[in-house]
Image (cartoon, helix red, strand yellow):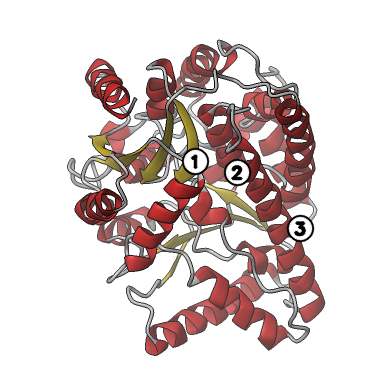
Amino acid sequence: MSESYREMWEKLNLDLKAHDGLLEVLGKFYGDIYMSQQGRLQGMEYLDFVLSEVHGLRIQELQQAKASGKKIVGTFCVFVPEELTLAADAVQVGLCAGAEAGMEEAEKIVPRNTCALIKSFIGFKLARLCPFTESCDMVVGETTCDGKKKAYESFADYVPMYVMEVPQRKNDRDRELWKAEVLRYKEELEKRTGNTITAEKLKNAIGICNDRRRALQRLNRLRAAFPVPISGRDVLLINQISFYDDPVRFTGSISTLCDQLEERIKKKEGIVPENTPRFMLSGCPMAVPNWKLPYIIESAGAVVVGEESCIGTRNTRDLVDESPETLEGMIDAVCERYMKIDCACFTPNKERLDNITEMAKELKADGVIHYALMFCQPYGHEVFKVEKALKAEGIPMLSLETDYSMEDMEQLKTRVEAFREMTG
């Protein structure tokens, strides 16, 4: 990245030496996993550029937005309704981190047996490595797991924290609670930004968010072709970048990429041979730069054709109804759409089991790899139910539990290779 960004990073109070080290490691890691691929689409050059400038140009854009009076809202979860954030003339960015950096600092305020994702976003802040967190005027958490819930209490000493309560069931009273939380978030946004969320602004914001979902839905349909036209790790990168990039620009770029995919499909061109085993990933989200498992799978002679996760179909499957014209009607539509999310925090959660089995069938997956971060209780518990549901449909499943370290790479690769042989 350009030296011109150093002054900006210094103003954001980053640890420049440690940050330089992080960018160097990230660049090498990215090169090994992504740039080593053969036959990548030309449209991926845009995503390569975005990631290369994720701490540079994108942060500069956020600083320019702040200078123009906009507020920056950081989030950790797909439950935070971006439609309302945009309607308040604010910018929303994802803050989840997928690297081990800053773990020692994080363990000063959370237990060691906390999941890697939580320790990572805390560690990035305490080690002064994340310009996104430092750019935020408001950081929005949610109660999707006990680990996050308690971590936010400590994290609030370091960032301007706001927490939304996500209900744990989907009965009428839970939907009432969720609507109350969405309205409370609307009020908080209006208070912090000084802007009123109107029906016109919300309708426009719903359209922006739905257009991005439609582009990603189209991508997921196209990648299911025979032979598979794009690697799973490239699609993971696309989904990850969707949480950082400007939504309108991102949608346009992914639409162009999909045009290229359609041309490749017409020519029967694939990123791998047609008989390559097709695996679907299920479970915990994978935040940048957590590319370990897709890389292992695709290096083991298989290809990832879908992700049932928050960085995947859970975030894109459902649209907000665009027919309401009143502000109240639109808010109801937003609430309804977000209550369709099948997060493992819900109990019971048959919805997720049905979605996983249906998705595996639609993708003609040869098997499902269920991924859980160590110490992630919700997804760890659901492994058994997911395996039972898939077995009833005759779909093989491999359960893997790991963290962000590279120490278990060979062990994971051995297990994935054995699973590939079994399903092949």
Q: In the image, what residue type sits under mark 2?
A: Asn
Query: Contact (CB < 8 A) between labels 3 and 2?
Result: no
- Identified at 26% across, 61% down, the residue is 146
Q: Position of residue 67 (x, y in %)?
A: 76, 50
Which labelled disc corresponds to residue 306?
1
- Give the quadrant of the C terminus: top left
Which image quadrant for residue 277?
A: top left
The residue at which mark 2 appears reads as 220
Indicate the secondary structure of the residue bearing disc 1: strand
Measuring from the top left, give residue 351's x and y in whole percent. 38, 66
Task: Identify the disc placed on residue 69.
Answer: 3
- Kindly state the secondary structure of the residue where label 2 is placed: helix
- The residue carrying pointer 1 sits among few (fewer than 14), some (14 to 19) or many (20 or more) residues within 10 Å by Cα, namely many
As shown in the figure, which amino acid type bears the numbered disc 3? Gly
Q: Are marks 3 and 1 in contact (CB under 8 Å)?
A: no
- Sequence-wise, which precedes: disc 3 or disc 2? 3
Element type at marker 3? loop
On screen, residue 360 versus residue 327, left or right, reads left
Are circles 2 and 1 on residues that touch, CB within 8 Å? yes
Residue 7 locus on image (x, y percent): 66, 27
User: Which residue corresponds to the image point at 79% horizontal and 67% vertical from the top-left?
Assistant: 204
The foreground one among 258 and 269 is: 269
